[in-house]
Image (cartoon, rainbow, N blue to C red):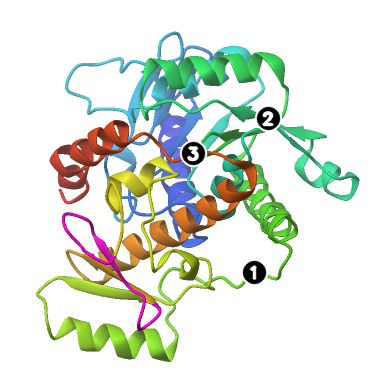
Amino acid sequence: MPHTQETETRQMVVNLAQDFLKAGLVVRTWGNFSARLDKDTFVITPSGKAYEGMQASELVTVATADGKPLAKGSGKPSSESPMHARVYQRYPEIKVVAHTHQVYASALTLLGMDIDVPEPWQPVLGTTRIPLSAYALPGSRALHNNMADTLARSDAQIVLMGRHGAFILAETAEECLRLAEDLERFAIDLFAECLGKEIAHRSDIQSDSDREKSLAQEWQKTTQEGVAVSADSEVLPWLSGTLSPYLDDFAQICGVSVSQRRGSASVVFDPDAKVAICFGKDEADAKNVRAVLEKNARAANIARLSGQKPIPAWESLAMRLVYQLKYSKQANR
């Protein structure tokens, strides 16, 4: 590929990642984005690097054959790179791939099955059925093999990833963002239908009610950490008990369980005040923690209907440790 065209492709991926971030379809460093350069190579976002301020030169050039970087010292690609490679191997027409952690699509993976798409949504989402790729640990060979099996049985451009998020396949960046946004609108409707009620959710990750803002200011006086408060209606049913990880990023970012005793978690429940208190290295980080908490609560509420169990404790602990020792440090570079 000519140098100018590759430069444009790299910048397109950076722009796309930042557009997804602004749209609330990914949080912090979670998710990954790639674009085809030619039949043999693609570029992908680096592992654990925050999208804010990401430079096009930081993207890693990867071989389509195996998802491994072409040059030593070129940076570490996303651990999901082999999954992107499977797409480019199978579909010559696909030029852009996004893996998201969007709220409602992620929660619906706890239905534990493929989702039939109602007729009005079929032309919007381009399929009659959204397949579910089976859960496995993030970045694992099993996860990538599960995706390969799912791609082999479906030609949908949208795949849900069990307890993880969504995978979007597109010919252009514009189509990729549009599909992800339409998927989330569909997921919100289906979530409300499953629970049999109207759903309230934040307009964006930064938004606070007056009460949440006031309580956060009071808590901030007691700690050097950043604080955010959640009075979210989907978190409310869990405040008097324990919330376990139903989504893998909850285990990584919030902890192996959340209850009224904080322990090593990044969240503590206050059932008397009917809120959850979220902590981070600063206020923005605490709001990221809150976003993941509220997403996991939605997944847990779907799991109550479908009978799905939480992620096993040993897997949650392993993911938490890897996040604390590795990815959180990479994101802060």
Q: Which mark is residue 180?
A: none
Distance in Å between CA atoms under marks 3 and 2? 20 Å
Q: Which residue is mark 2?
A: 131
For the point 31% across and 36% down, the residue is 313
Residue shown at 45% from the left, 8% from the top: 65
Q: Could you say which is closer to the camera, residue 78 or residue 226?
A: 226
Numbered disc 3: secondary structure: loop
**Residue 252 in sight in this render:** yes
Please give the name of the residue rendered at 76% of the width and 42% of the height, measured from the top-left corner. Answer: 125
User: The disc labelled 2 sits on which kind of residue?
Assistant: Pro
Q: CA distance from mark 3 to mark 1?
A: 23 Å
Q: Earlier in the sequence, mark 2 or mark 1?
A: 2
For the residues bearing labels 3 and 1, Cβ distance under 8 angstroms: no
Q: Which residues are magenta?
A: 260-274
| Residue 284 on the magenta segment | no
Question: Does the magenta-highlighted stretch encompass residue 264?
Answer: yes
From the image, tell me which residue sits under label 1.
Answer: 199
Which marked residue is nearer to the observer: mark 3 or mark 2? 3
